[in-house]
Amino acid sequence: MPRRSRSQHLGVSASAGGAVACACAASATFLGGWLAGGAGIDVPWAPTWDLRLAFELDGLAALYGLLAAGIGVLVFVYASAYVPRHLADQGRSRREEARLHAAMVLFLVSMLGLTTAQDLILLFVFWDLTAVASWLLIGFDRRNRDARLSALMALLVTAISAVLMLIGILMLRVEYATTQLPELFAVARPSTTVSAAVGLIAVAALAKSAQVPFHFWLPRAMAAPTPVSAYLHSAAMVAAGVFLLSRIHPLIALDADLLDGLLVVGFASMAVGGVLALAADGLKRLLAYSTISQYGYVVTMLGVGGSSGAAAASFYVLAHALAKSALFMTAGTVTAATGAKSLRDTGGLARAMPLLAIASAAAVAAIAALPLTIGFFKDELFFKAALERGDVVAALAVAGAALTFAYMMRFWSGIFLGAPRAAPQPVERRLVWPVVLLAGLVLIGGIVVAPFAGLARDAAAATHAGAVKLDVAYHLDARAENLMALAAYTLGLLVLALRPVLEASLGLVERVGNRFGPERAYGVSLRGLNRISDRLHAVEVRDLRARVAAVIVPAAVLVAVGVAFTPTAGSYRIGNVLAADAPLVATLAVCALAAVAVTAPRRHLSLALTLSAVGFALATAYSLMDAPDVALVAVLIETIFALLFVGVFALLPGDVLRREAQLRVHRSRTVRDIVVATLSGVVTMLVVWAAFSRPQPDAAMAERHLELADDAHGKDVVTVILADFRGLDTLVEVTVVAVAMIGVSMLLALRARA
């Protein structure tokens, strides 16, 4: 093997092996920590803001962390065989495989940090990291326009909703002076503020879990390679949303309306996802819609609340993640073997791929809640929780389970039963054995359920903020849960049998959704914002005045809105002007007159000198306010700039300066400039006036600075302030230069390749 290709191959193998090793280490750590009774870290992060790096491996973190890491091991192994095929089909270099593995490890780390975070600000940081990592993974095929747009859609939906989450977090901080979850659970009481804040956080969680009406991004995300879908969209990313709902559930439970809202969204997602899954033809698209529906189950159970709802939700997440990851990988393996990506192009593969058929049948049986699989118990707990909320909720639960049974059976039978349509090509064992191992866990959980129930019980205890009883076993009797399960199977078979008759109606539902649904609204909104952005950009780059106005006007509007909606009683005070203040008043008057006079001169030298008069007048004001050091700096700066202007004007050709001086601005622009300047000046005056009306006590601030000087390892306060601010400024400058250099080097490399 040539040296270059050999090293390249080894590098790719190392990246895949490193990803698997990271997932194995995380799995072992979380499993060991859970078996040991939990662990935690709590160290100061930003003490002045009362922010801490608080992580705790409780039952909820153990459940979601083990799913992210444990399933991650199998998905990463699967990816090591799938991605080289995927890249070869697109004519891309295998070096890009390392990029995908790195992004998947980044997502794993972000998910583990999210699950263990005990501070809402810290949780928000990891929340956004998962969004960035998912954007990289969904858009991995960057040459594919659909992949890029799908990645952007997922990022916008989850990132914009994350802003609502941040607002909710800050509202809780203002109300209770903390973002530590244990403290919030202890002190929070029912109130309008808490309900609004928690509602905003819940919206972000529902968007992340692709619940109605934010569900449209998930089917589009199927443009990602199959390992990404198997990981993010079954066990990790969409699970992050219901994890957040579970983590803050003690706050949600303070308001019965929020619980009812979760019920409504959950059942709506079950219905919409189920109907669209029944109508879908694409393999991964069907599974995406089913994921929307299945997480609707979890949201519904969290809406039911109580210990039974928490227990059912935790167990459902566990069972669903195991089975759905196996089904996504099944779809990828079928595509790799046959090239088919839809049900219409597959069929009859059970004879040619018996091991995959059996393993995926176990996974389908688990989602459909058939006995002898772990999925049977998830529906039993779901039915039990639904019964506690009344007959209507129980009936809707049976209807949702029937839809699940129908589209899952359609998925498996469409691939493996019927007449063969294509002879599958041999595939690597790594594309089959991860499915087999997950199917084995699904079957083991259907017989030896205690370990799985113990993990779900500990997670439910964290969700419920109290002890939870979770007993799962087979009961051969006529209890309500068994009768509901039999009804779901019967209705599911009926729906499956009637599907050919309902096909036209299902297609109509899909078309109506595409035409009038939230995805259409997203597209219209995005195009409208692009048009507005283009028009604003055209105005902004027209001339220097427009560019300055594009900065000043939005800032002034935002400040004006803040002033308008902020109580201002006592904020604006007028003090007494003493005789001793006369020099300062006269100096400020000269400064104001000079600022106005700057607009008058047409000659460049007069303009520069008048502008300098503003700076020198301010320097005089600084000296009168007992700030000689600031005054000296101001004088030096104004002198240097005045000389610089004069020197530049002396070097420029005289005819150019004369031509520029004779230019006249259109009257409409003159009026615009006067209006912008006046409004900006008024807003600035209001802000400054309010600030000076309520000055902070200097002594308290000075004492605080003195206290912090030793912590910063400085000899005096001035040194510390200068070093800290200048150091941060330098860090930002170095970062900007480094990013620019990286960009230039990449452009040069691309040009060299071309």
Image (tube, grey):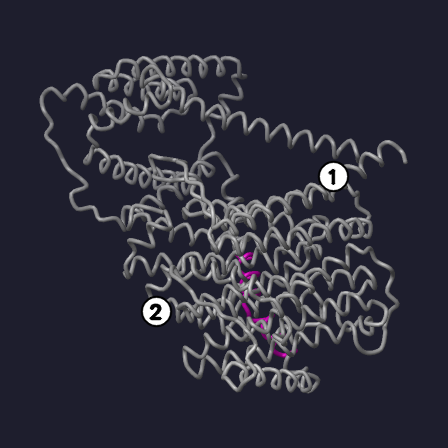
Quarter of the rendering occupied by the C terminus: top right
Residue 685 on image: x %, y %: 26, 36
Which residue is labeled 2 in the image?
256
User: Which numbered marker is on residue 14?
Assistant: 1
Instruction: Judge by depth and name the residue closer to the eye, 102 or 268.
Output: 102
Label 1 Cα crowd, 10 Å radius (few <14 / some 14-19 / many 20+) = few
Residue stretch in magenta: 507-528
Is residue 748 found left or right of 661 in the rendered image?
A: right
Label 2 Cα crowd, 10 Å radius (few <14 / some 14-19 / many 20+) = some
Question: Element under label 1?
Answer: helix
User: Which numbered marker is on residue 38?
Assistant: none
Q: Amino acid at mark 1?
A: Ala
Residue at the image position 64 percent from the left and 55 percent from the top? 71
* Residue 512 lies in the magenta stretch: yes
Residue at the image position 77 percent from the left and 53 percent from the top? 82
Q: Is residue 678 above or below residue 470?
A: above
Residue 93 on image: x %, y %: 79, 43
- The image quadrant that residue 442 belongs to is bottom right
Question: Element under label 2?
Answer: helix
Q: Amino acid at mark 2?
A: Ala
Dominant secondary-structure state across the stretch colored magenta: helix
- The image quadrant that residue 369 belongs to is bottom right
Q: Is residue 175 above or below residue 635?
A: below
* Residue 190 lies in the magenta stretch: no
Exactly how many numbered labels are in the figure?
2
